[in-house]
Amino acid sequence: MTVQPVFRQALGPAWDRLGEVIRRHYAMRPFSDDHVCVRGTMDEVWHAPWAALLMPFGRLFGALVPHQGKEVPIEVHYRCRPDAATLHWDRVFRFPGRAAFHFRSHMEHDAARGSEVIEYVRFGIGMRLAVSAEEGALVFRDLGYVWRVAGLRVPLPLGLLLGTAYVEERPDPADADRFTMKMLLRHRWLGDVFRYSGRFSLGARTGSQ
């Protein structure tokens, strides 16, 4: 049973090349009740006009943020579970005049593929992600989509519609407890489909020792 953090498993020695605030952020232990909350502001939450057609499916699978805005307050809860090696995310967007929107997912390290993790949303839909440490930042690059069913991972050609994702979390050089993040979903022919970016402050890790 591994007790190393999910991204430390994926990165191996490259974990030490992450910025200190990023390492503290993701130092939560599998098979524990560790919890971290980060709070901040999304400078922008945006999607292409035609992407509104995808929102009913996004709501079904819990995978897309349906609203747009600037300077959107957000908090993100990261939790481990005592019975699993997974890392769970609950992103809470607070758009003015709307109920809080939760974007929930969980990540698993794919030990058979080294530096790869899979982020799952509802109904076993997952995105394969290559993880790397680049100039102190934690970077994720989309490797394609899968559907986990009956113990199998079935490839899904969703990238033909949604494009390819890039995500990074980067230390703020001006503040040891802050970091920035951005997510971009870009289609080869249609351009940017979704994007958001923001600034966060790292809270303390809690959990049984």
Image: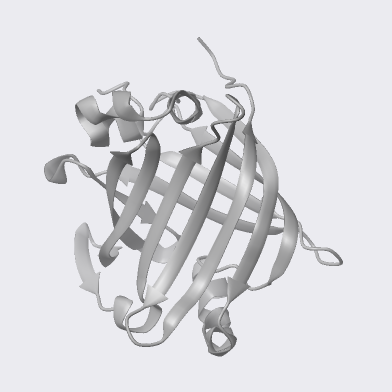
Is 15 situated above or below 103? above
Q: Residue furthest right?
A: 97
Q: How does the figure colour the protein chain or chains? A: one colour
Please name whichever residue, 22 or 52, is drawn nearer the observer in this view of the structure. Answer: 22
Is 142 situated above or below 4? below
Quadrant position of residue 103 = bottom right
Q: Residue furthest left?
A: 112
* Residue shown at the point (67%, 57%) measured from the top left: 43
Please name whichever residue, 115 or 168, is drawn nearer the observer in this view of the structure. Answer: 168
With 200 as the anchor, is 53 left or right in this view?
A: left
* Residue shown at the point (33%, 35%) measured from the top left: 7
* Residue shown at the point (30%, 82%) measured from the top left: 160
Residue 78: image x %, image y %? Answer: 54, 37
Residue 207: image x %, image y %? Answer: 56, 19
* Residue shown at the point (42%, 54%) measured from the top left: 167
With 183 as the anchor, is 55 left or right in this view?
A: right
Please name whichever residue, 76 or 163, is drawn nearer the observer in this view of the structure. Answer: 163
Residue 163: image x %, image y %? Answer: 36, 76
Quadrant position of residue 82 = top left
Q: Quadrant of the N terminus?
A: top left
Residue 191: image x %, image y %? Answer: 42, 81
Q: Residue furthest top?
A: 209
The tally of labels here is 0
Is 33 situated above or below 59? above
Quadrant position of residue 70 = bottom right
